[in-house]
Amino acid sequence: MKHIFRRPNFSQGFSFVELIVAIAIITTLSAIFLFNYGSFERRVTINILAHQIAGWVYDAQVSAMSVKRARNEAGRFPGYGLYFDMATVNKFIFIADLNGNRVYDPYDSVTSTCGDPSEECEQEIILLRGNTIASLCGNMPSSGGQSQNCASANPAYPPLYPTGVINIVFARPNPFDATIWGDVNTAVFPQVPTAYTNAEIAVTSSKGYRNTVTIWSTGQVSVR
């Protein structure tokens, strides 16, 4: 007797149940991918912002080193730098130190705007996508019993002191050295800004992702 072997029929396709299971698997995998992509994008965005701040520090140093001419007077070659203020955490300012006092003198918003020839504000850099400045910290002790409550982003560094503002200015004849000044020290007379040998600027996203830019008075910059 001959045995007849029938070839399996592969033309039937998916059953309805198999189709539903396949769609469910694809939907789940897509949701996981989109969720992880959103987190990844926010991490990348805040990392890019930190590196952009580092780039602006470099631009200020180059402007001072190349003797960039001030806009208001042909014969003036000011220092250049950045100004950060915890009162405006959604932006920072690229400045030209026109009067040479190593701190930013805000413009009068009633009579002028940032970018006018007579103003030290060269450009306002707005932070997008809900990113903000989280903290400003310096490494020198403060007076008046202020506590060290800024944790350094650099391993083995001691805690830092908070400050409401940070001025970073590069100027002739030493454009490779930065003057880094914070809040005015009210415990001394005459009152002068607190000087730092390094400062840390922390930026954060709307979801809490964080990066820190460290600037040293030697002009070195690092991002963590």
Image: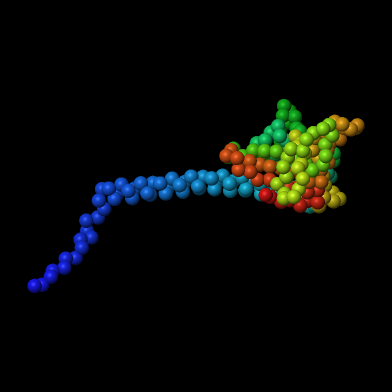
The residue lying at 76 percent from left, 41 percent from top is 160
- Image coloring type: rainbow
Q: Quadrant of residue 8?
A: bottom left
The image position of residue 26, as x and y in percent, is: 38, 49
Task: Kindly identify the residue that appears in the image at 67 percent across and 38 percent down.
Answer: 134
Q: Nearer the viewer, residue 29 or 41?
A: 29
Q: Is residue 173 visible?
A: yes
Query: If the image is split into quadrants, where does the N terminus sit?
Result: bottom left
Q: For this rendering, which residue is in front, 185 or 61?
A: 185
The residue furthest right is: 189
Residue drawn at x 80%, y 33% is 146
Tell which residue pokes out farthest to the front in this image.
1
Towards the viewer: 146 or 53: 146
Q: Position of residue 163 (x, y in %)?
A: 76, 36
The outermost residue toward the left is 1
Q: Position of residue 202 (x, y in %)?
A: 68, 42
Q: Is 110 located above or below residue 31 in the figure? A: above
Q: Is residue 71 visible?
A: no
- The location of residue 208, given as percent across then percent down, is 60, 40
The total of numbered circles placed on residues is 0
Q: Viewed as shown, does residue 89 lie left or right of 174?
A: left
Q: Residue furthest top?
A: 110
Q: Nearer the viewer, residue 54 or 104?
A: 54
Residue at x 75%, y 32% (from the top left corner): 107
